[in-house]
Amino acid sequence: MTTAARPTWAPAKGGNEQGGTRIFGPSQKYSSRDLASHTALKPRKEGQDTQEELQRRNLRDELEERERKHFSAKDDRDRRRGSHLLLEGAKREADDRIVPRSVDADDADVGANSSDESEDDDDDDEDDTEALLAELEQIKKERAEEKLRKERQMQEEDIKAKEAELLRGNPLLNNPTSFNVKRRWDDDVVFKNQARGEIKTAKRFINDTIRNDFHRKFLQKYMK
């Protein structure tokens, strides 16, 4: 890439001084990128942990105070959690002790009726369980029979596919109307087996341009 079109600080001028002998003085122009920038460090202000502030502070005491606050807050949280658990436990025990009564205590048949109802409920639950077990066994049996049926069907399909493949491989069964072997294209040509009595000479390699077979054949054909 040429640099002829780029601007220069001291462009060439025609005249008596051309030829590279001109002497240029220092330029008084500067680029904005050549100017000095950030010549001073940014100091810390008051409240930004200056060196005087760090010297006045006692870091060990501050650390111990923060640890003390942390552990005291943790103890308060544990204490509140323990009291909440105790209240919940007491309330649960009170709820367990309270038994709701929907009938009068003077009725004498309350205990008998409740025992009879519980026995009837137990009998109904046992009957329902037996019915569910029987239905489950029936479902398992039906699934096993369906699986066996699918396996037999797949085996039968595989056997049929193999038989069809064997039948397709037999050339006599592919075309039952004609059992003749197809004729070759050169069965009825006139000039067939004409070179049957000729002796075919074997090819040989002789590393001599005068005594090889090609040279002898050439001489016999053109130089006889």
Image (cartoon, rainbow, N blue to C red):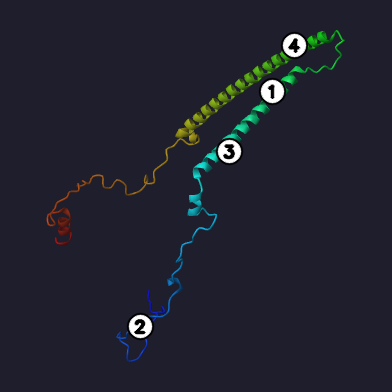
Report whether 89 appears left or right of 194: right
Query: On the image, numbered disc 4 is attached to which residue?
Result: 123
Query: On the image, numbered disc 1 is attached to which residue?
Result: 89
Percent across and percent down for residue 163 are 50, 29
Residue type beneath disc 3: Lys
Residue at coordinates 68% horizontally, 15% vertically from top-left? 134
Q: CA distance from mark 3 to mark 2?
A: 74 Å
Query: On the image, numbered disc 3 is attached to which residue?
Result: 69
Query: Element under label 2?
Result: loop
Report whether 65 appears left or right of 20: right
Pick the front one: 64 or 171: 64
Q: CA distance from mark 3 to mark 1?
A: 30 Å
* Number of residues whose C-alpha sits closer than 10 Å to that of mark 1, classed few (under 14), some (14–19) or many (20 or more): few
First along the sequence among labels 3 and 2? 2
Percent across and percent down for residue 132 are 69, 17
Pick the front one: 132 or 162: 132
Residue at coordinates 52% horizontally, 42% vertically from top-left? 61
Rendered-image quadrant of the N terminus:
bottom left
Residue at coordinates 48% horizontally, 50% vertically from top-left? 55
Q: Nearer the viewer, mark 3 or mark 4?
A: 3
- Disc tally is 4
Percent across and percent down for residue 197 are 23, 45
First along the sequence among labels 4 and 1? 1
Q: CA distance from mark 4 to mark 2?
A: 120 Å
Residue type beneath disc 4: Asp
Query: On the image, numbered disc 2 is attached to which residue?
Result: 25
